[in-house]
Image (cartoon, rainbow, N blue to C red):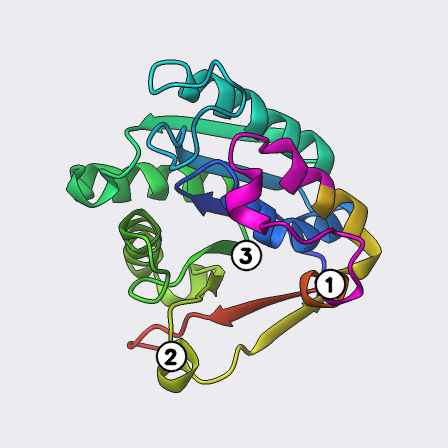
Amino acid sequence: MERQKHLLVVLPHPDDESNMSGTLAWHIHHGTPVTYVCLTLGEMGRNMGNPIIANRASLPEIRKQELEASCRSIGIQDLRMWGYRDKTIEFEDQEALISRINGVIAELKPTLIITFYPGYSVHPDHDACGAAVIQAVQRLPQDERPTVHCVAFSAGCEDVLGPPDVMNEVSEFYEQKVGSFQAHKSQFQIMVGSRSFDDPQVKAYWGTERFWTYRFKDE
């Protein structure tokens, strides 16, 4: 990894950042400013009843607090919650969303953006978020485009995309990563299952974070 002028993270749900939290913590530790744009509050999350008061009405506020706690664990200070409705990103006004992302890029002038790889990230919100980011960057002049690192995990994605070309070793920031996952208490069991973070295999797996560098067709 290399220190960046500014790192912009654009993801649709609270807890999406946990999977890349070691990379984000590394950048913050090494002086890179990190801005996290989270498109929704995950109010359609599959797991309710943890805490017992959680329901569709209370879940957005619960997940907002969890997201803030996750960011504190990672060290993110610039968190922006845009308030789109969960599971509807693909149905939003795409031109308005792309323009809004362009506005943040113009404001921050990031040298690196992290998002989901459109078409290879399982959830429709993941794919729609990634597609909007890619289109926003595509509209910039080639010499002004930041590098875009994408997360992909759909079945067979490596058969199409090839192996990830960015492998970040983040075991030094394992504690921050565990804190990020544990902050999302309402979704915790769905995300990590029943295995302990002390399990050597879990530590080995979560100690490396994988990304694909998006290559624009006109470059």
Give the percent coordinates (x, y) of residue 28. Answer: 73, 45
- Dot 3: element: strand
Give the residue at x 75% y 43%: 176
Which residue occupies the foreground of this view, 100 or 19? Answer: 19
State which region is magenta: 179-201
Of residue 124 and residue 215, the one placed in the foreground of this image is 124
Residue shown at the point (65%, 49%) measured from the top left: 21
Q: What's the amino acid at mark 2?
A: Gly
Who's the residue at 80% across and 54% down the image?
A: 198
For badge 3, the amino acid type reads: Leu
The image shows residue 157 at horizontal and vertical percentages of: 39, 76
> Residue 63, relative to residue 141: is it above or below?
above
User: Which of disc 3 and disc 2 is earlier in sequence?
Assistant: 3
- Amino acid at dot 1: Gly
Q: Nearer the viewer, mark 3 or mark 1?
A: 1
Residue at mark 3:
112
- Asked if residue 51 lies in the magenta stretch, the reply is no
**Image position, residue 4 (x, y; %):** 66, 55
Asked if residue 30 can be seen in this view, the reply is no
Residue beneath disc 1: 207
Residue 213 rendering spot, x and y as whole percentages: 48, 71
Look at the numbered disc 2 and give the secondary structure of its residue: loop
Residues at badges 2 and 3 in contact (C-beta under 8 Å)? no
Dot 2 corresponds to which residue? 156
